[in-house]
Image (spheres, rainbow, N blue to C red):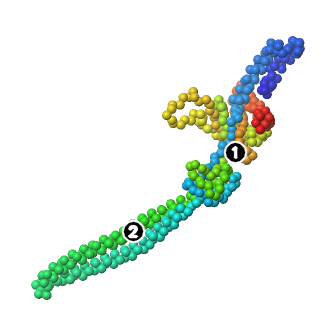
Amino acid sequence: MLEFLACSMLTIFPDFLFRRYWHGKRLGQDITLFSMWYELRYGLSACFILTVSLITLIFYFHPSTTSASSYFRTVTILPELSGRVVEVNVENNQDVTEGDLIFRLDDSRQRAAVATARAAMVEVDAGELLARDDLRVAQANLDAAEAAFEQTKDEFERKNTLYQENSPAVTVREVERLENLIQERLAAVDAAHSAAESAKHRVEIQLPAQKDSARAALHQAEVELDKMSIYAGQTGRIEQFDLRVGDYINPILRPAGILVPADTGRGRFQAGFSQLTAQILKPGMLAEMSCISSPMRVTPMVIVEIQDVIPSGQIRPTDTLRDPQNDRQPGTVIAYMEPLYEGGTDHLPPGSKCEVNAYTNNHERLQDPDIGTGEFVALHVIDTVGYAHALILRFRAIMMPFRLLVFSGHH
């Protein structure tokens, strides 16, 4: 309507003045409702062409959208293990900080597992003391066996020397007995050495492995015990939380509530523009935003990033080939916006539904000394008509409460 009124002042109104004062035709007699097309045909045709061109120029070089919002993540309050609630430390709509205890489940079974694992650690430590005693006993037995072997060996060598000298003090039977005793002592040394090595291996290899296993079992039991206490992983606000002592929580079937992080969805908005404006939208473009949650207020924004893919082309592998003709919606170009001034969107809650205008700025190109006259005029016109779009946004922001509360029928 505003574009039509502006264009009519440049086309229809001059045509009417020409007919009225040059041709002498009077409104209501020569120029009537029925003869208006014939009398003002040049002005009406020019107004229609100019209005269509102006609207196309405005909406192409200064794109707008009504699909803009700030998306935020939520964290499901959910334990890793099932259990019955024994303690609740927060209430619904309560602010929490990272590390605050939210609720605790019955952990009697996990505490028993921790006690069992600690007892196993004590048992391993006691076994290590006994094993070191056994090692000392085995080493002593080895020393005794080696001493007995050396003694028997010396006695054999002494008596064998006398026997070789044909001494009547030594008999053949005694020498043979000492030979057999040497073999017996040598076997005893081997047995004692094996026992000492076995005790040493138990102290140096088996018991450390058992201790590591017991320590790992204790750590696992403590981890399972910690899982029974649910803490806030981020600073935020508890929503949809109505947990009571005695409730049974299941990580699959029944979550406890939702945690909305305090920093999510704030200061960053996403706007979906038509694909027709994909070549116009650029990072750094200025924009203005009007939201339902803050009517009659326009917030200056700046486009910081353009998503390089269009969501309508996303596919998920299935057993059916995708047919492009089944895509009913063409998809939009997603632009990420941030407030032009620090704290500019603090008054907007996350999830606000907004309308956005983006504005093409040719100031740098107009400063080029080599620019042609035609291009200079065209760029000036493009920048100038942006004011009309800004005026439309402000008019819509003013009319938004009346349009939604009165004319739409939604209260």
Instruction: Point out the image quarter for the C terminus.
Output: top right
Q: Residue furthest bottom?
A: 169
> What residue is at 55 percent from the left and 63 percent from the top?
108
- Residue 83 falls in image quadrant: bottom right
**Where is residue 364 shown, x and y percent of the image?**
70, 35
Q: Quadrant of the N terminus?
A: top right
Look at the image and tell me whether residue 83 can be seen.
Answer: yes
Residue 403 sits above or below residue 84 on the image: above
**Which residue occupies the foreground of this view, 106 or 287?**
106
Q: Position of residue 103 (x, y in %)?
A: 63, 58
Tell me the number on the disc at residue 204. 2
Q: What secondary structure is marked by label 2?
A: helix
Q: Which residue is mark 1?
A: 350
**Local crowd at mark 1 within 10 Å, few (<14), some, or many (≥20)?**
many
378 or 246: nearer the viewer: 246
Sequence-wise, the earlier of marks 1 and 2 is 2
Labels in figure, total: 2
- Residue at the image position 36 percent from the left and 71 percent from the top: 199
Q: Nearer the viewer, residue 303 or 309?
A: 309
Left or right: 257, with 401 as reference point? left
Looking at the picture, which amino acid does disc 2 mark? Glu
